[in-house]
Amino acid sequence: MNAVMQLMKDHSSVRNFSDRVIDKSLLDNIVQSGQAASSSSFIQAYSVIRVSDQQNRELIANAAGGQSWIISAAEFLLICADMSRIQTCCAKAGVEQLEGYAEHFIAATVDAALMAQNMMLAAESAGLGGVFIGGIRNAPEVVTECLQLPEQVYPVFGLCLGWPTDRQMVKPRLPVDVVLHQDSYQADLVDKQVDEYDEQMQNYYSTRQSNVKTTNWSLQTASAIQGKKREHMLAFLQSQGFLKR
Ligand SMILES: Cc1cc2nc3c(=O)[nH]c(=O)nc-3n(C[C@H](O)[C@H](O)[C@H](O)COP(=O)(O)O)c2cc1C
């Protein structure tokens, strides 16, 4: 264990922020730290939109189901998977422009997510807090229109950053043995392991500082996955030029 690992394990999402701004030089450093993440074939297939316009923040907060922290955070960054720059590379190289491959969708989405998580860690190392906002995919066309995203770019999620006014308890993760399989996938242990974790999480949900609930991880996860099918996503992604083949 070292200081970096401790920082990672201390993560909890922050949704309550003070009015203090984030210096532009710190923000630039956070974005550069994000860019230091590995990138599939070094395509760097992401763009980040810094949303400062208050009206757009309000529009996006509504689109995301009324998440007020999108408005109150010092910074709201939209993390996009971006294959549009790569079309320019293909044109410069005089090769065929490629559109709609599932593989490219995966590569760009992974690139964007790795970059974003690096930004979160960099921000946390500076004493900031943040939360990712998948809720923007409730109405991806609203975000796409108001921030003028071109074809071959899609909004993966948002990131609120700011100076925390409070911090939540760290949420216990699945035990390492559940996610780290030895040599082959160990399906037979899952039921027992999830039962044990459910007990731990039931205790966490009933004793945390805010949003106390009577639930466990299985119930919470089953309901989350049912409630967020976002069936519009396939047609939306195709309209932006992704996932056609
Ligand atoms: C891709 C992604 C999307 C998320 N979307 C939202 C969101 O729209 N609103 C929100 O309040 N939290 C959101 N979260 C935060 C998760 O709820 C949170 O990470 C999870 O419950 C674990 O809690 P922790 O981050 O405090 O450890 C998102 C997290 C990820 C990784």
Image (cartoon, grey):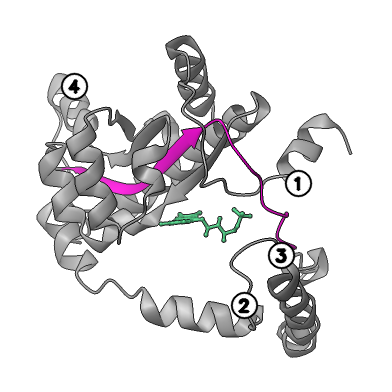
Name the residue type under label 1. Answer: Lys
Q: Residue furthest right?
A: 1
Sequence-wise, the earlier of marks 3 and 4 is 4
Three-letter amino acid code of the residue under disc 3: Arg
Separation of disc 4 and disc 2 at Cα?
Answer: 56 Å
Upstream in sequence: badge 3 or badge 1: 1
Say what secondary structure mark 2 lies in.
loop
Compute the Cα span from label 3 to label 2.
9 Å
Tag shown at residue 213:
2
Residues drawn in magenta = 152-173
Dot 1 or dot 2: first in sequence order is 1
Q: Secondary structure under badge 3?
A: loop
Tell me which numbered mark, 4 or 1, is placed earlier along the sequence: 1
Pair 3/4: label in front: 3
85 to 141, vertically: above or below: above
Residue on which the image places disc 3: 208
Spatial separation of the CA atoms under disc 3 and disc 4 = 56 Å
Q: State the image coordinates of residue 111 (x, y, percent, origin top left).
A: 43, 40
Task: Report helix, strand or loop for mark 1.
Answer: helix
The three-letter code of the residue at mark 2 reads: Lys
Magenta span includes 242: no
Is 123 on the left or on the right of 45, as rendered? Answer: right
Q: Which residue is mark 4?
A: 93
Q: Residues within 10 Å of mark 3 (few under 14, many from 20)?
A: some
**Residues tagged 1 and 2 counted as in contact (Cβ below 8 A):** no
Residue 39, can we see it?
A: no
Q: Position of residue 185 (x, y in %)?
A: 71, 76
User: Which image quadrant is residue 40 in?
Assistant: top left
